[in-house]
Amino acid sequence: MEELVLWSRAQFALTAMYHWLFVPLTLGLGVIIGIMETIYYRTKDEAWKKITKFWMKLFGINFAIGVATGLILEFQFGTNWSNYSWFVGDIFGAPLAIEGIMAFFLEATFIAIMFFGWEKVSKGMHLTATWLTVFGASTSALWILIANAWMQYPIGMSFNPDTVRNEMNDFWAVALSPIAINKFFHTVTSCWVVGAAACVGISSWLIIKGKDSDLAKKSIKIAAPFGILGILLTIYNGDGSAYQVAQKQPMKLAAMEGLYNGQTQAPLVAIGFLNPHEKIMNNEVEPLKYNVNIPYALSFLGFRDINAFVPGINDILKGGYTQRDGTIALSTKEKMERGKLAILALSDYKKAKADGNTYMQDKNLKILEANYDNFGYGFLKDEKDIIPNVSLTFYAFRFMVIFGSAFLGLFALLSYMSFKNIPYEKYKLLLWSCVFSIPLAYMVSQSGWIVAEVGRQPWVIQDLMPTSAAVSAVSSNSVITTFIIFCVLFTVMLIAELSIMFKQIKKGF
Amino acid sequence: MDYNFYIQYWWFIISLLASVLVFLLFVQGGQTLIPTISKNDLERTMLVNSLGRKWEFTFTTLVTFGGSFFAAFPLFYSTSFGGAYWLWMIILFCFIIQAISFEFRKKDNNVLGTKTYDTFLLINGYGGSFLLGIAVATFFTGSEFSVNKENITNPFMPIISQWANSFHGLEAIVNPINILLGLTVLMLARTNALLYFINNINDDTIRTRSKKQLWICGTGFVVLFIAFLLVIFLIKGYAVNPQDGVVFLQKNKYFLNYIENLWLLVILLSGVVLVLFGLIKTLFSKKLFTKGIWFVGSGSILAVLSLFLNLGYNNTAYYPSSFDINSSLTIYNSCSSLFTLKTMSVVSLLIPIVFAYIFYAWRKIDNKPITKEEMQEGGHKY
């Protein structure tokens, strides 16, 4: 069973990370192309048409492979997470269906006009089609991120013991959950950064090679300021996201900060290294070494109050501290007891119902309702199961924040030089930094998802269902086989895509 | 409007999406015909580009079909996808390789070479349509699974849906009735593809070859489809007792559904008439008739729609279990809550708008059929 869960997770991580190699460029470059074509539409300058078409070609190559990897993500909820699909399908399925109806058709239809419509529809219609494609792609991101946010903070539903699943009772609570809104803007604007980095990096490479320098510089003039906008919004929403994590997922926050023992006036770790987890848990060493802290910052960012108590991993295990709402936190052991009570009550409720014993039915229903908040804890075997991989979460978070923020400097510098007409093509080091900022942007983007998804383990639905209870009843060998097939197939596809991309880029505008 | 209405409404939406998907499999059918209809590179390019402007609709419909099935009937999603793991995985592989093939096949430095991508298109064409037919056929012939929702209270093995054999869906591929429907869907996809070529490509050679091939595929489809109908009319079907929800085998169930719901029969027969009209008119007209796709296409949508409605309505179990008959899924025991179905119904009001803009965009792109000249000009091509 453990092997099955592990491989199912590995497969999901593999396919999601591959998919996430292509989505950010679609979302980011899409907007840049939209801006470029708008300029062409307004100025009628053929140079801008040429620029638009060049980037559109790269967009198309990238889009196809994004579609290919996206298919498996949707169906994987059924194939590999069948128990999950029943337990929360009543809520989780809806955003997926809405995504299909509202977003995918929009993308699929208007991308055809984008590529084949240059000579067939008016300029205005073509521009509209381009923007509708971008709008469709962003809408798709909205609904899938609403679905993801709901897993991190399940609301707008109640558990129905008769159908043995969670059922939605407030659609707007799901769709407009603060986590969802933050996640959407944080994710989409960070994709703008990736798109801008790709556009700036590729243009810089063309300038270095002395190919179509003027068109490349025009592209940078659009992409660099757009990148500034993207990164500023990403930072703003990132702060919002961290605030939400502090409220709803304290264990994730503790892992992000390597915070084992909570404190008031908690500092934020700017940089630092973690000691081995086991040794820290046994109190043999301090959690961090060589760390540089920003005083009070964690309390302030997490709770908007420098005196706020931020619970650490040990506090969450032991409980007993006062939470923000004034209640005393339960220990994890206590939560596990309550979870087991809830599961047992559900079982007894079903038996009583089958026997027609209404007294026992009511009694067990009350126990279930009183303890349902901790339902998922009843599946855990050990209290330490609630600790995610601390070092992965900790380092991924630092990587994202430090290197992500660096983009602000890069884009600001480029924008300044572009608009002041400073001949930056002379600065080869700057241009090469732009080129290498492309892989960096992708790594930063992936590390963001590592923080979000590794940091929330062991939960597939926060507090209600651990990952281990969500899988399908297939053999681990089957999952290993499909994992290998996906790994080989996606890798080959990626190599082919990059090879085609490089060739197209070499050809220039 | 009560719960019952919304459940039936959503089964209708799922059936509609399924039937539109089967029609759109003409892209897959067309991919299988590329070697037969084209004799040189230019002709091949015309076929590929003609199909390449439509493949995303099929793909998107498949994804939306999956998402809607998940939202409206989540127990099917968890039972079938998690259980018939290998059947669905192979179908997914067939579609994954399609998504890149059009865009990558002719690009410089595409690593695998045009031939490989064209082989991908063939695999997707044959595999995608045949295996989707197999999967749908199990809605009539049954699968080996059990569903026990109380398993969730067992912390050591909390999984609700279990597959009863270790083939996980591969067993469906050797069932003769399933094979029959698989071949029927493949032939339908090819038939629609030929009619689509005749409509979409302005080239005498391609049109003549397509028409010639239509004799084989068109007749093949009609014969196979009638054979399939006869078989399912004769076998025992999975009926539900509406009082207690108990599922039992009933003789000629799928035939009786048509007789007991004459409007279903009307839909089926209208579909058949449209298909036959489109085929006969295309094959026997002295003058070139290019509108066949509209008749056969809409006819096939109606026929498939009637089959799906037959499976869900009139106290029928649409996803039966031959292992544990009372685990069989009906639209009532597998659906979402009333609240979710209502919410989704509001969203479904967008579907006509979707159809409208697809129709508009399609018209714009297909204003002029594809010609040799267009393929030799610049512009985006596959």
Image (spheres, rainbow, N blue to C red):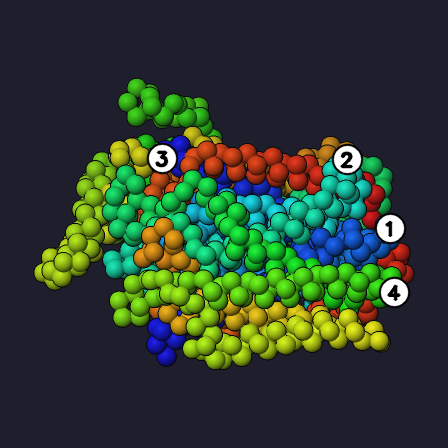
Amino acid identity at mark 1? Asn
Question: Same chain for marks 2 and 3?
Answer: yes
- Residue depicted at 79% across the width and 74% down the height: B284
Q: Nearer the viewer, residue B225 or A98?
A: B225
Secondary structure at numbered mark 3? loop
**In the image, B315: left or right of A162?**
right
- On whether disc 3 and disc 4 are found on a single subunit, the reply is no
Q: Few, some or many C-alpha atoms within 10 Å of disc 4 (few <14, some 14-19, many ≥20)?
A: few
Q: Are marks 1 and 3 on the same chain?
A: no
- From the image, state whether disc 2 or disc 3 is nearer to you: 3
Residue bearing the label numbered 4: B204
Q: Nearer the viewer, residue A344 or A279?
A: A344
Judged left or right of residue A213, residue B343 is left
Residue B165 % position (x, y): 41, 42
Of pointers 2 and 3, the one earlier in the residue sequence: 3
Give x and y (percent) for residue A219. 75, 50
Looking at the figure, which quarter contains the N terminus of chain A?
top left
- The alpha-carbon separation of the residues under discs 2 and 4 comes to 59 Å
Q: CA distance from mark 1 to mark 4?
A: 14 Å
Mark in front: 3 vs 4: 4
The residue that disc 1 covers is B40
Front in this rendered view, residue A435 or B346: B346
Q: Residue furthest left?
A: A359
